[in-house]
Image: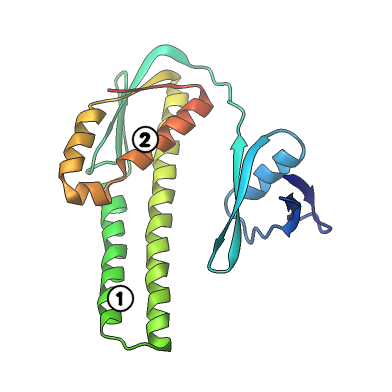
Amino acid sequence: MKLSNDEQGRDFKISLFKLPFRTYLGKDRSDKRILLQRVLVGQIKACSSAIKVIKGKIFLLLSLEMPQKDHVLQEHLIAEASLSIEHPISVSIDNDCYQIGTKEEFLYRRIAIQAARHRLQRAITYNRGGNGRKRKLKSRDHYNQKEKNYVDSRLHLYSRRLIDICIKSQAGTLLLVNQSNKEEIAKEDEFLLRNWSYYGLIEKIKYKAKMAGINVIIE
């Protein structure tokens, strides 16, 4: 993949599989533009890339090798974290305890999005073919993406807060308490399996912990 700035210097030009592309980052409320600029100047290494076409739009899937940040950490200082429905993350370090997120914030909001999608789905059932049905199908897909985006943003926020607490407390080891047992229970509970994203949250915690130099132990 060959990356360069475009003429205006705002977005980027990419040569992928010998095909020319131009990026469109829009308002870019995340850090995509900054990451691509760091790739351009050699601060970050682009490991692999691919393109995906969704509803006529072309998306670039880019894998980056992020440099590990150096923090002052004490490996013997352990942060004990517990994942649950009531509070997505509860963490204790020495005598300090923190709770990250709430059931109302994560679960109820997700269920509200699902309920809206289900109401729309029932309405589609009684629609004949035509533009009205197409509009409702488009709205259903919108709710699917809305739920996915909401969950992903919450998990990123919760995992980021957890790692920030560990760094501030200089905890070099993060222990996820009784996680294996909780995952076994979740497998037997259809509601938990569908609505509580244990695996996604753990993966984000592990990734951010690795970047910060924190050792993760899953109990």
Tell me if 204 is positioned left or right of 126 in this view: right
Q: Nearer the viewer, residue 177 or 138?
A: 138
Coloring applied to the structure: rainbow
**Label 1 – label 2 distance at C-alpha:** 32 Å
Q: Callout 2, which amino acid?
A: Ile
Point out which mark residue 120 bears: 1
Can residue 164 be seen?
no
Q: Position of residue 108 (x, y in %)?
A: 26, 56
Q: Which residue is mark 2?
A: 202
| Secondary structure of residue under mark 1 | helix
- Residue at 30% from the left image edge and 58% from the top image edge: 109
Which quadrant is home to the C terminus?
top left
- Residue at 76% from the left image edge and 45% from the top image edge: 2
Q: Nearer the viewer, residue 25 or 61?
A: 61
Q: Is residue 17 above or below residue 214?
A: below
Q: Position of residue 216 (x, y in %)?
A: 39, 23
